[in-house]
Amino acid sequence: MSDGEQATTADSAVDDIPPLKRDRRSVFTRLTEGLKFIWASKTATVGLFLVLFWVFVAIFAPLLTPYTPLEQDWKNPNIGPSKAHILGTDELGRDLWARLIYGARVVLVVMPVTDNLWIPGGTAIWGVIVALLVGTTLGLVSGYHGGWVDEITMRLLDAMMAVPIILLYMIIMAALGASAINVVLAMTIVGTPGIARLVRSLTLDIRTREYIRAAETRGESAWYIMFVEILPNARGPIIVDAMLRVGYAIFAMGTLGFLGLGIPPPSPDWGSMVAKGREFILSGSPWAALWPSLAIATLVVGLNLLADGIREESMRYQ
Amino acid sequence: MDEQAHEKSEVVLDVEHLSIAYETRKGDVQAVRDVSFAVREGETIGLVGESGCGKSTIAYGIVNHLGPNGKITEGHIRFQETELVNKSQAELGEIRGNNIAMVFQDPMQALNPSMRLGEQLTEVLTCHRDISEKKAWQRCVKMLKRVNMPDPEDVMNRYTHQISGGQQQRVVIAMAMLNNPSLLIMDEPTTALDVTVEAAVLDLIETLKNDFNAANIFITHNLGVVARVSDFLCVMYAGQMVEKGTVVEIFKHPSHPYTRGLISAVPKLGESKSDSVLYPIRGRVPAPANRPQNACIFAPRCDYATGECLEARPSMVQLSPDHAARCLYAKEIETRPKTTRRKPRVFQIKEAVAKQAASDECCLDSENLKVWYPKAADSVVSLFGLGEKKYVKAVDDVSLRVAKGRTLGLVGESGCGKSSLVKGLIGLEPLTGGKMQFLDIDVKETVTARATELIREMQMVFQNPDSTLNPSYTVGTQIARPIRRFGTVAKGQVRAEVERLLNAVRLPKTHYDRLPRQLSGGEKQRVGIARALASRPDLIICDEPVSALDVSVQAAVINLLLEIQHSFGTSMIFIAHDLSVVRYFSDDIAVMYLGRIVEIGPADKIYDPPYHPYTEALLSAVPIADPTAAQKEIRLSGNVPSALNPPTGCYFHTRCPRRAELLPDGGAICEQQKPPWQQNGTGHRILCHIPIEKLMEMEPVVHAREPNANGSVIAVDS
């Protein structure tokens, strides 16, 4: 075809549009815009503060307490809040505040792979990330491909969803043994079917859009269409879902810890703290069980509020 | 209606200086400003204008459905001499009772899918008056007969999804008429329907108006539709009424520049690109928040604007007792020179089209193409692959040819296989049979198996501006993708190439970094065109590229496509349901019915006799934007048959209005034998049993008219 050298006089139909500033906004303005978005919803604001509180104490844990989580004060076991120990101590005289905030670290900020190797990103976070990767890929493939691929994948995932979650966790952990890595693995296995279902339903909708047809007429590969054309447009619901899932993951970690299947002692784990402290509630020292329970509750509720608020707000803008 | 009756009949609804505003976070936004009109008994008033002009808001204002944030800020609405403004919901209910009825655009949403139609219809009666269930049922059946519903007793027992779209709209209209309302408001009642169905519904509305003597308000964006059903016309622009008058008067002497713009922006049936030019209205409808308060609201887009237009808001200028326009120059507009110098581009198009040599080189040639979809198994035997396989024959035996640099138009009702044909050509659906040659290469594979060099030569422009672009990426990225993928230019020059393309589709370079949500519908469509052009294809398939756009923008996009075709020498396949647009744009036209082409040939031959009976029916259904045009009334009965079980013999015989009168023994042959192709001169073929000589004797659907006032408007310019 001819190398069309166009006579290029601007059309009267468009010349009344004022030149626009380049849409490359700085990180700062983007951040403030995001905050404004959350600010508009009271639910999301409350959630954000709860979550930020725990992230803050987890990151700065070593600066916020003079104790380490393993340090034992032999003289003061099982005491209530006092000057020396603001939240009290457990049955071995360990400082509860220290154990609580170091416990938050394991959940939100670092993951103990081995005794010496700790990688950034909390155990719950890693669990959700890996589940997202696997679930999203499966969901995209079965949603975009359809047919037999879809049928087989979804039926397998359905079968997994049929097993009660707690039971599934216990089976996996019993089979693999208790360690942070295995907790992540268990969370992945349990979380994948739900994420795959969500992504699949989003994909089924998005793949009917005309820009997907345009990509197909260009002969783009299926992977390109799935990950470059479809995935970015599904990100909103996926992000909200991921936030809720971090909440579930924290819950699951607590449950596993409580059952003795979580991160092995003596590392400070909220679930095992509750399990140990439970024995002393009736003997007059409820603190060791109370604080970690509250911690789990506030963090999970905070994440749920944040996710719900964001979802409502984004629906409103549509 | 004659003048005297008009004086006598009673005013049912009187709207005076009505202003409506919506409360938003940024304060009140005025959606409607100072609108006055009156509707009398047995009269239809048409509200026309582009989207966002406040037409529907007026309707919602009248029935008080403005929503929690809408309010009437000024003015009066008097219904049968009772004031409706500032009355509580309960009082309104009493005044209105069942005297105002409304018909909406989408019948699917007006009917409850989980109730039988009979229950829904009788409910309307039993809820408002003391009437027994049985009597109500009988009245409903009667009413369904009135709206020409075939088999009304049976329909009463069906659910919404069991009847077709046109029938659903009939049920909604029947429901509205059940209580014998004094005022009927119709909001785009035919927009979602096919041309043939639309024509039948419009006929129905016309007869009901005469039978029931109700006052009607008809809201639409389509000038052709409004010309057919209305007595009076109110042209709305950006929340204000810019012109009102009788339909005949307005179409004969449009006196507001906006009305004139609208009329010259749509092609009239029979006009082609070689003999006339479409004039887009520049710019777009301003958002309610930034509309000028003390200036003519249309001035920024007006071709006649002067300094005075910006100084004060013009009032309605009375031109005749029945005609007024909100323009300072309304009285002299027909002879007034334009103040803006239009770029002579539109005329270049005309010359370019004239020069375009009839090329004989072939771009795409297909023979007996078939696209069949296997039907899912519905018996145990076929579950194991043993039963007889069934197919939906979406495209069956289609042969067509697109010459280089020319345009083939595809028309037909929805469900006739246009989209499946296109999918088959471009390789999104596998071909079940037939041969296809593209650029002298045999192509059988689907797109994933085609060579990249071949893929880049065939690209597509889509219908829906809102989904044609990926909302996650900027305009620049999306146009650059095909350039990178096909290596059209060296890597370093991609950005320059994208800017060149933006220029070619008349968008400023600053659009490079914009996201699709920041663009208007017309702009998105231009980006879609630029993306299709990016690989420098030989063939562009345009699937209803303008049908989702506003009238004034349509013209600009059509002109753009014409210009691109000329400067790049691209061949095109143009699909549209608007026959005037297809006629205007195409060199050759193929008419499809139930997966087959029934008539194919040069555009001018298709639109004159001899016609295939189906083409004739389609043409007579086109709403013509001219109330004085004489158009034959041929209406098809029934629905398009299922492609799973097509009729025997000629597919069209079940609905053909001509075979009984033009063939011996009532056209029995049509039911038994497949029709032959009949030749009529160069390249014009008709698939019909009726001998060509008899088809030749048919009258043309639209009689030749004297050039009207609008014709002369264009002449003044040149």
Image: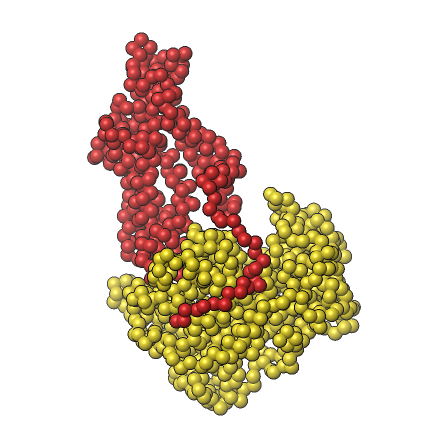
Residue drawn at x 31%, y 25% as measured from the top left: A269
Spot the residue most to the top. Answer: A75
Colour chosen for chain B = yellow
Image mark count: 0
Residue B150 visible in the snapshot: no
Q: Which chain is red?
A: A
Quadrant of the rendered structure where residue B383 is?
Answer: bottom left
Where is residue B184? Give x, y as percent.
65, 62
Q: Quadrant of residue B97?
A: bottom right
| Residue A158 falls left or right of residue B150 | left
The answer to which of B5 and B24 lies nearer the viewer is B24
Nearest to the observer: residue B189 or residue A222: A222
Left/right placement of residue B150 relative to residue B426 reads right
**Relative to B291, is B662 above or below?**
below
Q: Nearer the viewer, residue B646 or A190?
A: A190
Please provide percent x and percent y for residue B514.
48, 52
Q: Residue at x 76, y 57 (%)?
A: B81
Residue A116 in sight here: yes
Picture residue at 33% right of the left edge, 10% below the top: A76
Above or below, A136 against A55 in this view is below
Q: Looking at the figure, which quarter contains the C terminus of chain B?
A: bottom right
